[in-house]
Image (tube, helix red, strand yellow):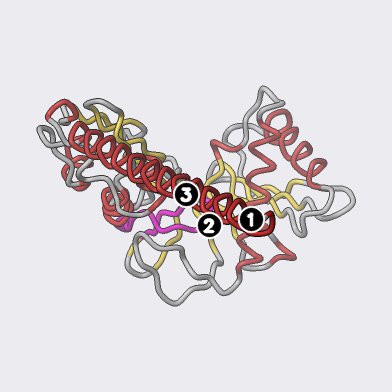
Amino acid sequence: MNGEYQREYIDSEALARKKKKRKRRIKKILFWIKSIFIIALFSTTIVSLALSPLFNINSIEVTGTARYQHSDIIGTAGLVTGVNGFKAIGRSIQDIFTLSYGNAEEAILNKYPYIKSAEARFAVPDKIKITLRERVPIAFISCPKGNIIIDDALYVLEMTGKNQPEGLLMIKGLEFEAFEVGQALDIKNNYNYEQALLLLNKIRESDERNEFKLYGLISAVDASDMARLTLLWDGRINANFGELLDLDFKINFFRHIVSKSLKKQDKGFLDLTIENPSFIPGK
């Protein structure tokens, strides 16, 4: 009898455990169903709110350009007021998380060569901010078709006529076969350009420490021969910097000569590669 009673007790315990386990499972399922329902309801509410007229674009602001009309930039971007700001946001993960208009940014960069970077973002609740950064022209290169204006990264900004662009120096001696506005210039002697750019940057840095400025009066740099890297200053003084060794000394010596030793009408040649640099008039 005791054995039979014990078996019945064990069976009732097992049944109770099963019922308890089933209740926990059902409770867990109900919890997840309820959670999913709440999340779906919350998401639907958020989406409905986001797409409501509350977030319609009221204004579009453009900053960072003095070269292009703001209305042209906005037209190229294809962004308009009166529509919901969330609807035109790009489909990439980055666009979604940064509230950016990727297509608008790409359209701006493709059309305007002077624009280096473009950010178009939704500023909740009712504004789009387009932030631009422009390329800075540093020089021009002469070719049979006219003059090519470039920035320091050799990016072709525009093609002008035969007249020298105002306020820009000429870089001579760069070898290339073709070019396209809005693309980087592919030159064969890239090292020559790097050395010419190094010389120009060093002169600009030196100007910051001196009252007498050199950079603004540089007319041209000839980078065709690295053993004879030559600078034309003020259209009248040719200075041979040669290989860019002892560059600080050469720049300071050149500054001293043109500011202290020469008259404004003097023309000639200065060889800075020899031990005792001297000025040769009229050469």
Instruction: State which tag comes first along the sequence, 1 or 3.
Output: 3
Q: Taking 186 as reference, is 9 above or below it? A: above
The one of 178 and 165 positioned closer to us in this rendering: 178
Give coordinates of residue 283: x percent, y percent: 64, 54
Residue flagged by tag 2: what amino acid is it? Answer: Ile
Which residue is disc 3 drawn over? 19
Query: Which of the numbered marks, if any, corresponds to residue 196?
Result: 1
Q: Do residues under tags 2 and 1 come within 8 Å of each other at their CB atoms? A: yes
Residue 251 versus residue 268: which sits nearer the camera?
251
At x 25%, y 25%, the residue is 125
The picture quadrant where one finds residue 266 is top right
Q: Residue at x 53, y 57 (%)?
A: 171
Q: Residue furthest top?
A: 211
Residue type (three-letter) at the residue carrying disc 3: Lys
Residue 233, given in percent of the width and then of the height, sits at 59, 44
Image coords of residue 173 (percent x, y): 56, 66
